[in-house]
Amino acid sequence: MVERVAVNTPSGMDRGERVLAFMIAAVVGLSIIAIIVSMIVRAAGGEVWPVVVALPLVGLPIAFVLIIVRLVVTAVRRARESRDA
């Protein structure tokens, strides 16, 4: 038998919000890894590639903007859901 799901059931995060969340996690994770790698390489007496040094300088502000976008998108979705309820 096939189960039917109501069309207007709130589903939580939609695809766009989920993509934003994974983008934030990926950018922050990559930036933190770059910071850790640069600290380890400098502690070992080596020279760090310029890309590894620049990655957190670019990635963390981008992640901050994405977090703000995610908050706005979530607030708009919740306001729309409460208005429709």
Image (tube, grey):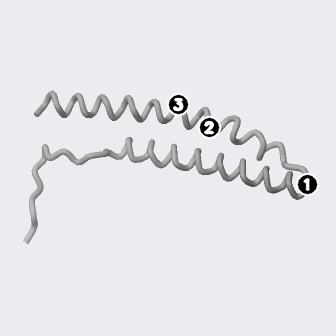
**Which residue was labeled with disc 1?**
46
SS assignment at label 1: loop
Mark 2 = which residue? Answer: 60
- In the rendered structure, which amino acid carries the disc numbered 2? Leu
Depth check, front residue: 8 or 57 = 57
Real-space Cα separation, disc 3 to disc 2, in angstroms: 9 Å
- Determine crowd level at label 1: few under 14, some 14-19, many 20+ residues with C-alpha closer than 10 A: few
Q: Earlier in the sequence, mark 3 or mark 2?
A: 2
- The residue where tag 3 is placed is 65
Q: Callout 2 environment at 10 Å: few (<14), some (14 to 19), or many (20+)?
A: some
Q: Residue at x 56, y 49 (%)?
A: 26
Q: Amino acid at mark 1?
A: Gly
Give the label on residue 71, or none: none
Among numbered discs 1 and 3, the one appearing first in the sequence: 1
What residue lies at 58% left-to-right and 45% top-to-bottom?
Answer: 28
Amino acid type, label 3: Val
- Classify mark 3: residues with Cα within 10 Å, few (<14), some (14-19) or many (20+): few
